[in-house]
Amino acid sequence: MPVDILFLLLGLCLLIAGGDLLVRGAVRIAERLRLSPMLIGLTVVGMGTSTPELAASIKASLAGSPGIAIGNIVGSNIANALLILGVAALIAPVLVSSRTLWRDGGVGLAAALALLAAGATVGLSREAGLAFLVMMVGYIYYAWRHERAGADHSAAYDRAVAMEEVDPALVPHEQPAGRLSVALLLFLVGLGLVVSGAGLLVNAAIAIAGQFGVSDTVIGLTVVAVGTSVPELVTSAVAAWRRQGDIALGNVLGSNIYNILFIGGLTGVIAPTAVPASIMAFDLWALVAVLLVVMAFAFSGGRLSRKEGFVLVAAYVAYVGYTTGLF
């Protein structure tokens, strides 16, 4: 047991560290391809920082553990909306733009409903995965056009900004910085760490689930989901500490969109899998309800207060307790 826990923690560390190196290298490579900083932020940074969740879900699906693959996606979104947003609100009240909330929160809600519909019909099949990826491309294109028009920032933009403020090395430059060989090396080393970390994490999670006598779905919804969401927790907490509540909220909303449409889409295309019955029966519906409650909280007063942040965190503790059978 201690060895499996150690491997799980090591896997998480490799995933997070590898994801960071991979994105740093990818940003520098994108600069060489003359992509605009805005486009790099929306695509390379936004998608690249989802690498830990992506690698874990694909590896779990290939290993025949849909509970971890889908549980990681759904559990990460629930953790984003309750734990991470709640912690951010506890640090400092999160001011909310109603337009951003309804637009990006609405896209996240639609993505959750799309996953629910896919689970009830074809599962996370290649066709469903392709549909999710098409929706992701559409959202990125919309966000890009939106930013070029100088309108309110999208959640995709805020997610990139949040990551760049925590790690300045992710900030793209108008002119290529550094050597291409170094960028390629960072990318390849990061990719290797991510793949290795995903293997350790998934294997350890399966072993721990067996030893505790719980399903791998429970492990995926809780331990794996929270572990792979650590970068989002850090970036939202830092944004809240700097009194950038709009960026903290955008980071959460953007992460929820990327988790389902990008990670779910690629997982379906690469390693199609069914959506576990227990997730269909409770957790996906819980996610939809949570998103509606968060939107109501934020819209009612134009912000998320510390009191509402406490309610969100308490709700997450209750959710984990119920899911794991602790109470």
Image (cartoon, grey):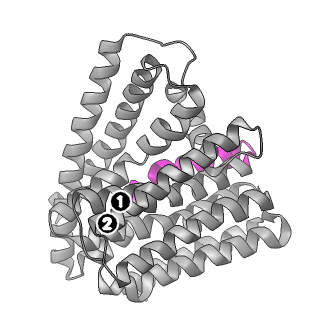
Nearest the eye: 180 or 239 = 180
Residue of label 1: 130
What's the residue at 23%, 56% (across, down)? Answer: 270
Q: What's the residue type where badge 2 is placed? A: Glu
Stretch of the chain drawn in magenta = 227-245
Q: Which mark is residue 56?
A: none
What's the residue at 37%, 10% (across, down)? Answer: 179
Give the vertical position of 95 relative to 116 (above or below).
Answer: above
Label 1 with label 2: CB-CB less than 8 Å: yes
Give the vertical position of 4 relative to 291 (above or below).
Answer: above
What's the residue at 39%, 29% (across, down)? Answer: 26
Q: Of helix, strand and loop, which one carries label 1?
A: helix
Q: Is residue 259 left or right of residue 68?
A: right
Confirm whether the magenta stretch covers residue 149.
no
Q: Quadrant of the C terminus?
A: bottom left
Give the vertical position of 50 relative to 298 (above or below).
Answer: above
Nearest the eye: 48 or 80 = 48
| Residue 292 seen | yes
Q: Which mark is residue 127?
A: 2
Label 2 Cα crowd, 10 Å radius (few <14 / some 14-19 / many 20+) = some
